Amino acid sequence: MTDCIFCRILRGEIPAQMVYDGPRAFAILDINPVSWGHTLVIPRDHFETWNELPADLAAELAKAAQVVARGVVKAAGAEGFNLLMNNHRCSGQAIAHAHFHVIPRKTGDEIKYQWKTKPYDPGVIEKVGSEVRAALMK
Ligand code: 5GP
Ligand code: ZN
């Protein structure tokens, strides 16, 4: 048993707007939404990040995220949505219990990522590709 907010919501200790209640995952409205209907899809069991989830639970969470995203898009009358997960504090994860965000989007909604991107210098992408492939083999 953990004291994390999502585990406490699941135990009924903190109120939440539950919108999906499945055998291995549930979904609640985010209390501080980026857009109308912003929803969090959460495994019932406590694991900190995507990488700690057992593969079968990751698959069930992904399936639940698809069911929830379809419903949220319909309810919001959205044109699209962002599906994202922050992993570890450095990425913006505030609650250390893995969860997907489903954020309904419409053209011109003025929601912006703050990420800045830049292309690799010439020849670098091949080296990065080699290093990532090597890490995946280990
Ligand atoms: P993270 O930053 O961990 O990816 O996202 C955590 C999300 O949980 C935030 O968007 C935040 O608004 C939401 N949140 C934090 N506390 C509560 C709460 O008590 N209830 C609900 N429904 N959402 C919460
Ligand atoms: Zn938890």
Image (cartoon, rainbow, N blue to C red):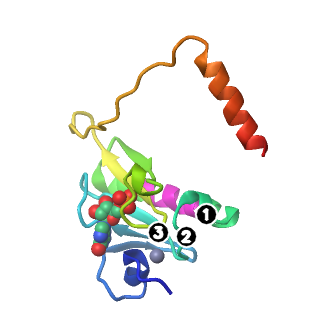
Disc 3 marks a residue whose amino acid type is His
What residue do we see at 47% from left, 68% from top?
97
**Any magenta on residue 49?**
no
Dominant secondary structure of the residues highlighted in magenta in the image: helix
Asked whether the residues under the numbered discs 3 and 1 touch, taking CB atoms below 8 Å apart as contact, a structural biologist would say no
Q: Is the CB–ligand 2 distance for label 3 below 8 Å?
A: yes
Disc 2 marks a residue whose amino acid type is Phe
Q: Is residue 86 visible?
A: yes
Q: CA distance from mark 2 to mark 3?
A: 5 Å
List the residue tagged with mark 2.
47
List the residue tagged with mark 1.
52
List the residue tagged with mark 3.
97
For residue 20, above or below residue 124: below
For residue 12, above or below residue 65: below
Asked whether the residues under the numbered discs 2 and 3 touch, taking CB atoms below 8 Å apart as contact, a structural biologist would say yes
Q: CA distance from mark 1 to mark 2?
A: 6 Å
For residue 68, above or below residue 24: above
> Would residue 61 appear left or right of 13 to someone viewing this image?
right
What segment carries the magenta color? 61-69
Specify few, some or many for label 1: CA neighbours under 10 Å numbering under 14, 14-19, or 20 or more: few
Residue 75 image-quadrant placement:
bottom left
Circle 3 — which element?
A: loop
Residue 129 image-quadrant placement:
top right
> Would residue 105 appear left or right of 23 to someone viewing this image?
left
Q: CA distance from mark 3 to mark 1?
A: 10 Å
